[in-house]
Image (cartoon, grey):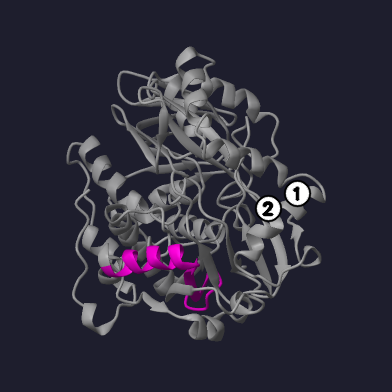
Amino acid sequence: MAGTYDLVIVGGGISGASLLYTTAKFTDIESIALIEKEAEIAAINSKHTNNSQTLHFGDIETNYKLEKAESVKQGAETLAGYLEKHDPDREMHAKRSKMVLGVGDEEVQSLEERYYEKGFGDLYPKLRPIDREEIAEIEPKVVEGRDSDEELLALQTPDGYVVDYGATSKSFVEAAEEEANVDVYTSTEVEEITEGYEGFTLDTTAGKFDADVTVVAAGSHSLQMAKSLGYGQDSVLLPIAGSFFLADDFLNGKVYTLQMKKLPFAAVHGDADVHDSSITRFGPTAKLVPTLERGRISTVKDFLDVFDLNAAAVLSYANILADRILLPYVLRNLVYDLPKVGTEQFLPQVQKVVPSATIDDIERAKGYGGVRPQIVNLEEKALDMGEAKILGDEIIFNITPSPGASTSLKNAMRDTRTLMDFFDGEYEFDEEAFRADTIDNFPRPEETEAEPPRAND
């Protein structure tokens, strides 16, 4: 196999699949190819067992400031709108209650300030503070066995979208393949990308592909490919592996705890699995690993390619891990993967959500969890929070840690605008049709049914 295309997208996870769908359905680009190294679409981090299944709106994620929450909210509403229109039978998602729980005077005060003073109550019309009695009605196990004198408050919303991102990715690709100008190649690994006089040549295990424009959406491998072309030299990755623990039928929806200050990782939360509400998952843990993919020793070499073993990278790692909050957190998370001891040590995290949980109620989930690439800025010697995008000449590299899946369609919209610039006006993007297919279908309270603001970024 080989081919010549206007656009080649590398990576068939939720990021690449979103862009394929957007360009195939809403532009007039004449030829598009998606290249995926696995035999199936969304077989790595987008697989439903390998992530938290959360559609992040920014309403209960207490490590988001208001500005970031506004951006994430619009991205989540775009994907939620797609699911509302294209998944009426909820085979790819479920909709349940979700809340962030404050326990004790300090946490309760923090949530009250967030809701009333910091603008989150205004930004999220469906979000509301609920007390112990209403928490117990929605999530009985959260209150059962808890000290009756302990202060409790939760910010709760019915917009708790739980998503199978793997199934969603496949739906994007299947819809795109209906178009005659789209080819999808699985079991096809990109071995090298070289820049030519016009466009790029991708050497793959299935032959050579020539592309006028290329987008690399290959998770942790995106930075590796960027570096091979001379981009992204000021960044390395801190790969974090997340694991989960399972319990039987503890929660009806999603319950978050407050984020620890200065930590870039999600706070431990409990939620009912997207496909089986009788299974409650707790996690994720956050373990530093020297690989780009969970359980694949072969990707240690890929990590070293990205790391470069240079002084700036070593100093950046040392500076980050020397933090008096982050270092104990990382060390504690290493313990969670140990047999028996790990479960015992993780139990207090579960009991923050379900106080009556015992060691016999939980077990470490085998085969669950993926790797999230945290981006390290070598100049600042610090973590860059959120997603990274590297723009080159007719090429884009997307590195999408959380909340990249939640904002995948919004990112695809933004990248498609960039692609139109790359093609110098040769093609057009029907953004109105894109919005009618996605964000315009997101259900809103009556008082906010006016058209949502359009993205400018």
Residue 142, percent across and down? 60, 75
Q: Which residue is mark 1?
A: 342
The image quadrant that residue 283 belongs to is bottom right
Q: What residue do we see at 75% from left, 49% from top?
A: 342
Q: Secondary structure at mark 1?
A: helix
The nearer-to-camera label among 1 and 2 is 1
The image quadrant that residue 178 belongs to is bottom left
- Decide which of tag 1 and tag 2 comes sooner along the chain: 1
Q: What residue do we see at 69% from left, 54% from top?
A: 346
Q: Secondary structure at mark 2?
A: loop
Q: What residue do we see at 24% from left, 46% from top?
A: 417
336 relative position to 156: left or right: right
Q: What is the number of the mark on residue 450?
A: none
376 relative position to 379: left or right: right
Residue 114 is covered by the magenta coloring? yes
Tell me if residue 190 comes above or below residue 133 in the rendering.
above
Q: What is the number of the mark on residue 368?
A: 2
State the extent of the magenta-drawn residues as a range: 87-116
> What amino acid type should be assigned to the residue bearing mark 1?
Gly
Give the class, few, some or many, for how many residues have Cα within 10 Å of label 1's Cα (few <14, many ≥20).
some
Residue 216, percent across and down? 43, 36
